[in-house]
Amino acid sequence: MTDDVNRRRGYHSPLRAEQAGQTRRRVLAAARQLFLARGYTATTVAGVAQAAGVSPDTIYASLGGKRGLLEGVYQLAVSDPADPAQREQQHHRDLAGARADPHQRLSELIAASCQALARTSPVHAVIRGAADGHPFAAGLRAQMLRNRLQIQSRNLRDHLGPALREGISLSQAAERYSALLSPELYHLLTVERRWPARQYQAWVTGLLDHDLLA
């Protein structure tokens, strides 16, 4: 009897796992839509559950509630192998490694960053709004800032290191890159000032090319 129970407990159903994954994606898609439309505070677990066609208990069991929804939405925006936009972003990073000219390598890195900003900047805005009244969101935002700077510093080191102009350190270059390619500035110019994304990318490319490589 014990062996039978253990076998049943250890059984893994690929179909069930796939269905659970699909449900999770549907819930996070609904949460993203409501967060962007209403903000963090006005969005409820019940509202997300209704939009996703699941019970609130399903959300609490799989994601832990509203905080887990926001964290899940952000993680999916940052890393989703099924997202064609993220595959295109990786393509630009691959091109950056293949280019001989440092100016072209920088341009490809900026193109990849701009694609990431187009996808993640709206979620960043939700997190910034939540940070005022929710300490976990403030902590999440601070962690995101640190992670972004670390990633950008690593990319600049790997692709531009020796090509940086004399007098600028890697840490200085990463700080300037991170400031100009920040979700806040991207949102200000492309949403509030209504710059086309191409205009923003060209502007940042010109500034950083002159500042880091000239």
Image (spheres, rainbow, N blue to C red):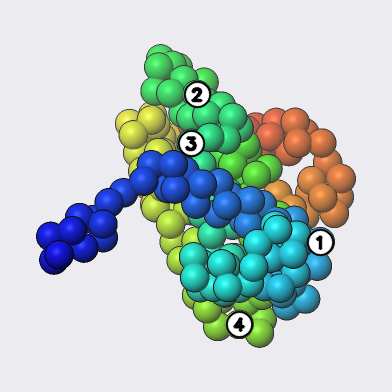
Marks 2 and 1, how far apart at CA: 31 Å
Hey, what amino acid is under mark 2? Answer: His
Please give the name of the residue rendered at 38% of the width and 30% of the height, measured from the top-left corner.
Answer: 159
Type of residue at label 4? His
Residue topped by disc 4: 134
Q: Which image quarter: residue 204?
A: top right
Q: Which residue in the structure is indicated by mark 1?
A: 37
Give the left or right position of residue 115, taking residue 46 as reference.
left
Separation of disc 1 and disc 4 at Cα?
19 Å
**Above or below: residue 157 compared with residue 55:** above
Locate residue 63, reporting x and y percent. 51, 67
As drawn, 90 above or below 134: above
**Disc on the earlier residue, 2 or 3:** 3
Give the labeled residue for mark 2.
91
Residue 113 is situated, as x and y percent measured from the top left of the image, at 56, 39
Please give the residue where the numbered disc 3 appears in the rendered image.
81
Mark 2 residue element: helix
